[in-house]
């Protein structure tokens, strides 16, 4: 009984850390898809880029961990802004197929660049000393890194929710998600709004990729391998919402960890089955609005 | 977007439509060392044709067509390993297994559209991949399924090391598939399918049974994909997990887009160009190769939406204009 309880706590804890990272990576995708209806399969590219920027900064230039993470956020946000203005914005009015093909093309290109620069092996992550130990509370040991991940993600999510629910920028985003034509006609510059939101979403993905580098290994196949999970978070959670993907990400994080721990022979079987069931029951996602 | 496919008044076979077959036969005599590659190209053409039917004509965007290819491949492989290595029965088993899966999944997922549909096709492929990965006693898991032998076709033609039999076998099967797809596309059924792609709402309003049409097309397409998978199993005598991977679905889509979709022969040109280029470039410069595919996709979407055949069409049209 004692063993079961301690493994339960352990699964919940690791699942929570994984789910938080998934959410930080995917939330930008939910907002951009909800805002412009753009099917961006290449979202994982930004997360991978964030991971690589952080690792390069730390391993090659000896930058400290917090500064490397901040660099990853800023560099990817700026790069994605350029990409959005140059390429993405031309395809907002195009069909779904064009968007899917274009973003698959971006994935292929980024995978090639990552292989060329970093090789095919996962990059080693060297965490600073203050994040490698164990923390003791309630008579248990918890890995400090994951505790930090959870706390940091919670504060990021808190900031994001405050930004969307309480600020002028958030009100404009919500208005544009609800009814873009109406938002435009009351004078909101939706195209600039979208560029900024896109950059923020990509930056968050980079942040998630960098922080979660030890949980989700940074390697060239990253955008392909984890695409399914990012998309599941958004599709199951519901487009354009902040709450839906949060619930979905935590569900996936905990379920995936639990399955790997107790029934490894099932693999990701359970998650895919639940995804199919949810999408058949509510095609617009758990918290999405009916189209 | 320009689509030249769809219903035409005169569906008779034009002279130029014999060109691919002449080239394929010529290859058999001129390039005997390339026959294994040739068989693979022919197999992928069948696979691309099956995707063209639902993507190019039906307008269903799928990221998971390899689910049916892989099902057919594993069905043929398991049959050969457990029961009989008779190739035609293997083909039938692969086709039926994939067709059945296509019917069941099609009935379920074609009720949705947009992101949900995209996600469901991806989830189904991932599910099939997990099943094949974990059911090691049947599929060999990550090691793959091999060590079975395929009997001579009709008891007469033995599979040889040079791949001559395999090449002709693939060519004959492709010819049958091409004939079937061509008949379908030029039939009233094909016309109503194109109608669904062009304007779903209007087809509903016109009283067409949209959902039923899509399910039928999806089932046929899945069965053809399974046939291609079974063919690959028999000609290579091996099944690996890759046949169910998302990468294969992606590459297939690239091939079809490269050739031009919604026009049958795009499915011929795309795999040929893609796989021959891959054979030359991918081993020497894998990084540049993947970068090239990605860049090509982006360029096709931005500038040349009809693919290679679309570009040729445009050139011919321009030449005619300058002459007159």
Image: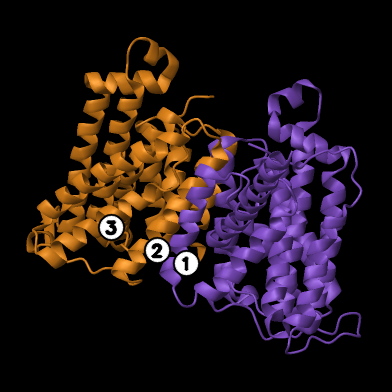
Asked if residue B10 can be seen in this view, the reply is: yes
Q: CA distance from mark 1 to mark 2?
A: 8 Å
Q: Which mark is residue B289?
A: 1
Instruction: Look at discs 3 and 2 and give the one toward the viewer.
Output: 2
Q: Which chain is the one coloured purple?
A: B
Q: Residue at x 28, y 38 (%)?
A: A199
Instruction: Look at discs 1 and 2 and give the one toward the viewer.
Output: 1
Q: Residue at x 25, y 42 (%)?
A: A77
Side (left or right) of B297 relative to B221: left
Q: Which chain is the one coloured orange?
A: A
Q: Which mark is residue A10?
A: 3
Q: Are marks 1 and 2 on the same chain?
A: no
Residue B166 locus on image (x, y percent): 77, 79
Q: CA distance from mark 3 to mark 2?
A: 37 Å
Residue on which the image places disc 2: A112
Which chain does tag 2 point to? A
Are discs 1 and 2 less than 8 Å apart at CB? yes
């Amino acid at each position: 009984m004692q063993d079961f309880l301690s493994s339960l706590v352990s699964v919940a804890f690791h699942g929570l850390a994984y789910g938080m990272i998934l959410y930080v990576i995917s939330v930008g995708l939910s907002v951009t898809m909800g805002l412009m209806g753009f099917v961006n399969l290449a979202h994982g590219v930004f997360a991978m880029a964030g991971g690589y920027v952080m690792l390069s900064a730390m391993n090659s230039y000896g930058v400290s961990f917090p500064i490397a993470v901040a660099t990853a956020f800023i560099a990817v946000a700026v790069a994605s802004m350029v990409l959005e203005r140059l390429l993405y914005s031309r395809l907002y009015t195009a069909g779904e197929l064009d968007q899917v093909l274009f973003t698959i093309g971006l994935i292929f290109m980024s995978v090639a660049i990552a292989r060329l620069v970093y090789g095919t092996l996962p990059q080693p992550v060297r965490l600073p000393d203050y994040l490698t130990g164990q923390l003791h509370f309630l008579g248990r040991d918890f890995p400090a890194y994951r505790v930090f991940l959870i706390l940091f993600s919670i504060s990021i999510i808190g900031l994001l929710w405050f930004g969307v629910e309480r600020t002028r920028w958030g009100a404009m985003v919500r208005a544009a998600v609800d009814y873009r034509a109406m938002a435009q006609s009351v004078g909101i510059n939706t195209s600039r709004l979208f560029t900024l939101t896109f950059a923020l979403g990509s930056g968050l993905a980079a942040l998630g990729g960098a922080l979660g580098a030890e949980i989700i290994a940074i390697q060239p196949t990253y955008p392909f391998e984890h695409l399914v999970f990012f998309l599941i978070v958004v599709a199951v959670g519901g487009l354009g919402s902040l709450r839906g993907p949060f619930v979905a990400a935590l569900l996936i994080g905990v379920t995936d960890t639990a399955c790997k721990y107790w029934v490894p022979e099932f693999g990701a079987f359970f998650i895919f089955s639940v995804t199919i069931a949810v999408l058949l029951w509510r095609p617009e996602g758990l918290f999405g609005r009916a189209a | 977007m320009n689509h030249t496919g769809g219903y035409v008044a005169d569906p008779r076979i034009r002279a130029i439509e014999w060109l691919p077959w002449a080239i394929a036969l010529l290859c058999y005599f001129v390039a005997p060392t390339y026959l294994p590659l040739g068989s693979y190209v022919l197999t992928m053409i069948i696979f691309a044709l099956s995707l063209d039917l639902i993507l190019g004509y039906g307008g269903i965007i799928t990221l998971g067509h390899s689910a049916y290819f892989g099902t057919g491949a594993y069905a043929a492989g398991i049959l050969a390993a457990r029961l009989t290595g008779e190739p035609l029965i293997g083909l039938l088993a692969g086709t039926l297994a994939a067709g059945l899966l296509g019917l069941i999944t099609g009935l379920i997922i074609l009720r949705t559209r947009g992101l949900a549909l995209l996600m469901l096709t991806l989830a189904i492929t991932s599910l099939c991949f997990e099943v094949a990965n974990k059911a090691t006693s049947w599929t060999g898991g990550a090691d793959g399924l091999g060590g079975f032998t395929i009997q001579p076709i009709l008891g007469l033609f033995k599979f040889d090391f040079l791949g001559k039999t395999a090449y002709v076998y693939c060519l004959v099967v492709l010819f049958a598939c091409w004939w079937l797809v061509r008949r379908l596309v030029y039939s009233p059924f094909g016309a109503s399918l194109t109608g669904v792609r062009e304007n779903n709402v209007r087809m509903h309003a016109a009283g067409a049974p949209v959902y039923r049409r899509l399910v039928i097309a999806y089932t046929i397409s899945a069965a053809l994909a399974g046939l291609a998978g079974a063919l690959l199993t028999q000609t290579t005598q091996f099944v690996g997990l890759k046949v169910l991977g998302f990468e294969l679905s992606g590459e297939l889509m690239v091939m079809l887009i490269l050739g031009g979709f919604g026009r049958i022969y795009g499915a011929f040109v795309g795999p040929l160009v893609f796989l021959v280029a891959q054979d030359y470039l991918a081993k020497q410069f894998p990084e540049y190769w993947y970068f090239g595919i990605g860049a090509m996709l982006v360029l096709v979407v931005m500038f040349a939406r009809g693919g290679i055949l679309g570009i040729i069409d445009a050139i011919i049209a321009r030449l005619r204009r300058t002459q007159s």
